[in-house]
Amino acid sequence: MTLPLLEDLPEPSGKKVLLRADFNVPITDGRIDDDLRITAAMPTIEWLQEKGASVTACSHLGRPKGEPDEKYTMDPVRERLAELAPDVELMENLRFDPGEEANDPAFVDRLVDGFDLYVNDAFGASHRAHASVVGPPTRLPSAAGRLLAREVEVLGGLLEKPRHPFVGILGGSKVSSKMGVIEALIDKVDHLAIGGAMCFTFMMAQGYSVGDSLVEPDWVDACKGFLEGPSKDKFMIPSDIVAMGPDEEVKVVHGDIPDGWKGMDIGPESTLAFISPLEKAGTILWNGPMGMFEDPRFQEGTVDVAEAVADSHGFTVVGGGDSAAALAKFGLDTRIDHVSTGGGASLELLEKGDLPGLAALREASNAPN
Ligand code: ADP
Ligand code: MG
C-alpha cells in the first residue's frame, strides 16, 4: 500500500476532520519562541478548509506525565493558531491522558468520536506509536497532510536518488543517537563530515586524547569500525578544535586535547576542510551543530558551515531541532531547500526508511494500492 494523500480522502466537504499536528513548539514563560511548527501545518489546514471541511487539531506539548499540568497547556498554541486559522479548534494536550503514550484503544475511540476523517501532519511525532498517531487510521479514512508528505518525499528521496556529490555533515551532542544514521548514510554519501561533540568519540577512536570533552567511551569501538571500514576515506574528522580550559581560557588545539580542556567547536582548519566539498555538492544533508553554538564564543564552526550550506547550488536538507534553531538564529533558514520539522523523526526515517505513523496511514481503508 502507498501513503494516502489528502486527494485520497473521500469527499471532505461538510466533514469533520481530526488533524494530528505537531505543535510541540518551544515555549518560555508562556510565550512561543518559534512558531515554525504551527505555520508549517497551514497548507494542510487551508486545503481542508477550502474543500469545505471543519478542522479540529490535536497535538502533544512537552512531557506531561499523563495528567493535566498547567505548565504544558496548549493555550499559547491556541492563541497563535487563532491568529493564523481562526476557525480551527484545538484540543488540550494529548499527553494529559496516559492513553496517548500507551496507545490505549479506548483512548483512540474517544479521540476519533464524532469525526469523519483523520489527517496526520505531525511528522515530528510520527516515529512514536502513540494513540493519536497510529490509532485513528484503523478507525477512519485517513491521509498524510502536506507537511508529512513533503518530509517523506524529501528525506526518503535523499537516500534513493541523491544527486552526487552527496555530502553529509553530522554534529550535535551524542554520537550514540546518530550511529544508525551514519550506518544508513555512509554507503550513499561521497563525504561524511563529523563535528559537534560527537567528533570526540571519533577522535578517541583515532587514538587522540580528548581532555574533558564530551565522549561516549562505549561507542569508541563502533567509531573505530567505521574509520577502518570500507568507507573509511569518506569520513572527515576535525584536525583542530576550539577548546576551553581552566578559567574559561579559549584556544585552538591541533590533535590531542590536553587534560582540563574541553572541546567546544571545530577549529578554523577543520571548518575549511568541511566546507570545501560543499561548493560542488549536488546534495547536502546537515544534522547537528558543529559546536556549542548557543554560546557566541563557540558558534563560528556552525555559522560557517551553515553559510556554506546556504550558499550551495545543490539540494540542501537540514534536519534536527537544534540545527534548525541555529539556522533561524543566523537568519539562513530561508536559503535552505528543506528544513525538516522533525528531530528524532527525521533521524529515524533516514535510518529505517519508515515510521510507525506512516505504516499506520498505509493500512487505512482508503489507502491506494
Ligand atoms: P539536533 O537537534 O540538530 O539533532 P543535537 O540535539 O544532537 O542536534 O545536539 C545539539 C546540541 O549539541 C546543542 O545544544 C549543542 O550545544 C551541543 N553541542 C555541539 N557541540 C558540542 C560540544 N563540542 N560540546 C558540548 N555540546 C555540544
Ligand atoms: Mg536536539
Image (cartoon, rainbow, N blue to C red):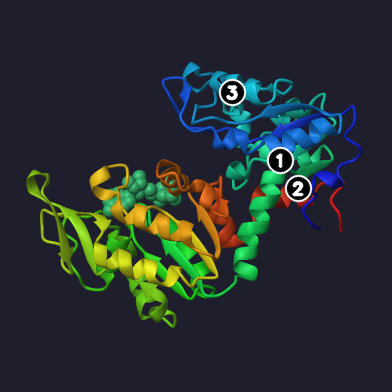
Amino acid type, callout 2: Leu
Residue 239's x, y, as percent?
24, 70
Amino acid identity at mark 1: Asn
What's the distance in space between the residues labelled 1 and 3, CA to CA? 20 Å
Q: Are marks 2 and 1 in contact (CB under 8 Å)?
A: yes
Q: Write the residue at 41% across / 54% down.
A: 288
Checking the image for residue 120, the label placed there is 1
In the image, which is nearer the foreground, mark 3 or mark 2? 3
Secondary structure of the residue carrying numbered label 2: helix
Query: How many labels were placed on the picture?
Result: 3
SS class, disc 3: helix
- Residue at image coords 54%, 30%: 61
Instruction: Mark 3 or mark 2: name the one nearer the start of the chain.
Output: 3
Q: Which residue is labeled 3 in the image?
A: 80
- Looking at the image, is 340 positioned above or below residue 195? above
Amino acid on which disc 3 is placed: Arg
